[in-house]
Amino acid sequence: MEKRILVFVNGTKTGGGSGFVNLVEATLKGTLDAKIVGVVSTHYNGGVQQKADRLTVPFRLFTGPWEAEEYQIFVDEFQPHLICLSGWLRPVVGLDPKITINIHPGPLPQFGGQGFYGHHVHEAVMAAYSRGEITHTAVTMHFVTEKYDDGPIIFVKRIKILDNDTPESLAQRVNVAEHTYQPIITQMVVTGGISWDGKDKRSLSVPPWCLDG
């Protein structure tokens, strides 16, 4: 049976959704053995919808409220085997945690939680680097619970911070790593190489190399 993936992406009025496009392209190349059956965004006719139309992926608009019943509308329609959050900035309630994963552009838990997204993460990372507290940032992927960035971590790719880095230059390198590894780790979840029961973090099954940075 072909696995079905539903993607949630905030995006903006003019852009966003590069991770979503990357996942779709991976399915077309065969490196991700699944089908992106739909994408949900918070902007009508924004960057994500324009990309979805170009890729002929069904687009749905999420206007809130951010409650379980609203999320369930999209789950009921698309019946996904896996849900991928890729730049989704809203609180998540009611989604099955054992089939919902997120990608985060920084180390967790240090640079996670409400308000830590996009450039906010990179600015905080660079500030910590300037104070001598860290030497690396990271791309992190994790299963999703209703608490921001608190689900079991399934992948970490450490990225060395350079002395001449700015939040913008760091973001570019992080983005390259995100696009490289997101389809790989998503494929492992799709095929069962990474799993958990959605309740007990001790049930998490992840190959050691995924967490060694």
Image (tube, rainbow, N blue to C red):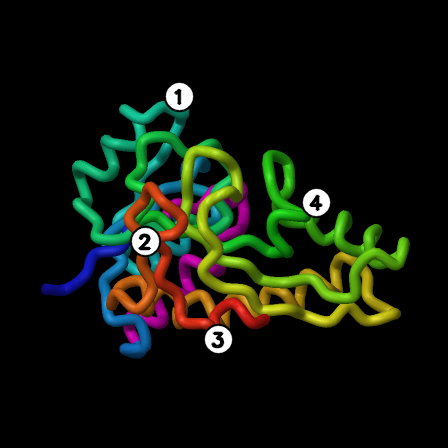
Magenta segment: does it hold 11?
Answer: yes
Disc 1 marks which residue? 65
Q: Secondary structure at mark 1?
A: loop
The three-letter amino acid code for the residue at tag 3 is Trp
Q: Position of residue 143 (x, y in %)?
A: 41, 50
Q: Is residue 12 left or right of residue 161?
A: left
Q: Image quarter for residue 42? A: top left
Tell me the residue at 41%/62% (across/down).
21
Cα distance between the residues tagged 4 and 1: 24 Å
Distance between mark 2 and mark 3 Cα atoms: 17 Å
Q: Which is nearer the eye, 172 or 94?
A: 94
**SS at mark 4?**
helix
For image coordinates 45% across by 45% down, the residue present is 151
Q: Nearer the viewer, mark 1 or mark 3?
A: 3
Give the mark nearest the N terminus, 4 or 1: 1
Residue 129 is situated, as x and y percent measured from the top left of the image, at 83, 58
User: Could you say which is closer to the camera, residue 37 or residue 137?
Assistant: 137
Pick whichever of labels 3 and 4 is earlier in the sequence: 4
**Left or right of 113, for residue 206:** left
Cα gap from disc 2 to disc 1, whole angstroms: 29 Å
Q: Residue at x 67, y 47 (%)?
A: 111
SS label for mark 2: loop
Residue range corresponding to the magenta coloring: 7-28
Estimate the x, y position of residue 212 in percent, counting from the top left: 56, 72
Q: Amino acid at mark 2?
A: Trp
Q: Circle 2 sits on which residue? A: 196
What number is the disc on residue 120? Answer: 4
For disc 3, the marked residue is 209
Let me know if residue 53 appears in the view: yes
Compared to residue 25, the image places residue 9 above or below, namely above
Instruction: Tell me, yes or no, whether the highlighted magenta stretch contains residue 141.
Output: no
Report helix, strand or loop for mark 3.
helix
